[in-house]
Amino acid sequence: MRKLSIKYLVFFTISTTLTLFLVYKDINNPLATGTVIGYALFLIASLLSFLLVILWKARRLPRQELQREARRFVLYFLIFFGLSFLINFSEPNLYKSISIALGMSLGLSFFDLVLLPKKTGREV
């Protein structure tokens, strides 16, 4: 992994743990509120940068690999949407099911494209 990816994942893990602790303990402090708001902004910025990097790197992929990634995305989306819908079958919430399926399938399909280093072309 690239150094930036490792630093990002470490920061993400620490900030998620801290935010979960603050929310779970219901700490009412201006610093805690600022931390949770900062974490929410961090998540939004991460999502936007993730999508931009996907689009930037996907345009350079060979057509066959791009089609394979797209098929994998659609397959993951259908699986997660179906599971989410089945779990909440008595009270279906399509917005929630679609958002969960979209996020999970994007993350699983394109994680290697965003956070892992480029392939050199020669396989070991």
Image (spheres, rainbow, N blue to C red):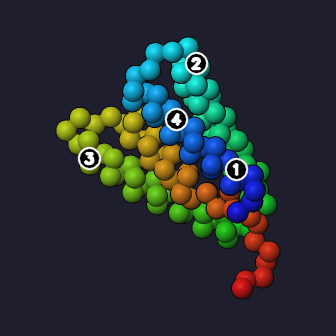
Residue that label 3 marks: 87
Distance between the alpha carbons at the discs numbered 2 and 4: 12 Å
Residue pictured at 40% horizontal, 52% vertical: 80
| CB-based contact (under 8 Å), mark 3 and mark 1 | no
The image position of residue 121, as x and y in percent, is: 79, 78
Which mark's residue is nearer the viewer, 3 or 1? 1
| CB-based contact (under 8 Å), mark 4 and mark 1 | no
Q: Amino acid at mark 2?
A: Leu
Number of residues whose C-alpha sits closer than 10 Å to that of mark 2, classed few (under 14), some (14–19) or many (20 or more):
few
- Report the side of 7 relative to 106 (left or right): right
Distance between the alpha carbons at the discs numbered 3 and 2: 37 Å
Residue pictured at 72% horizontal, 57% vertical: 58
Distance between the alpha carbons at the discs numbered 4 and 1: 16 Å
Residue that label 1 marks: 7
Distance between the alpha carbons at the discs numbered 1 and 2: 24 Å
Number of residues whose C-alpha sits closer than 10 Å to that of mark 1, classed few (under 14), some (14–19) or many (20 or more):
few
Quarter where residue 24 is shown = top left
Q: Of callouts 4 and 1, which one flags the residue occurring earlier in the amino acid sequence? A: 1
**Of the pair 34 and 74, the residue shown nearer to us:** 34
Residue that label 2 marks: 31
Helix, strand or loop under label 2: helix
Quadrant of the image for the N terminus? Answer: bottom right
The image position of residue 96, as x and y in percent, is: 39, 36
Q: Amino acid at mark 1?
A: Lys
Residue pictured at 26% horizontal, 48% vertical: 86
Q: Of callouts 3 and 2, which one flags the residue occurring earlier in the amino acid sequence? A: 2
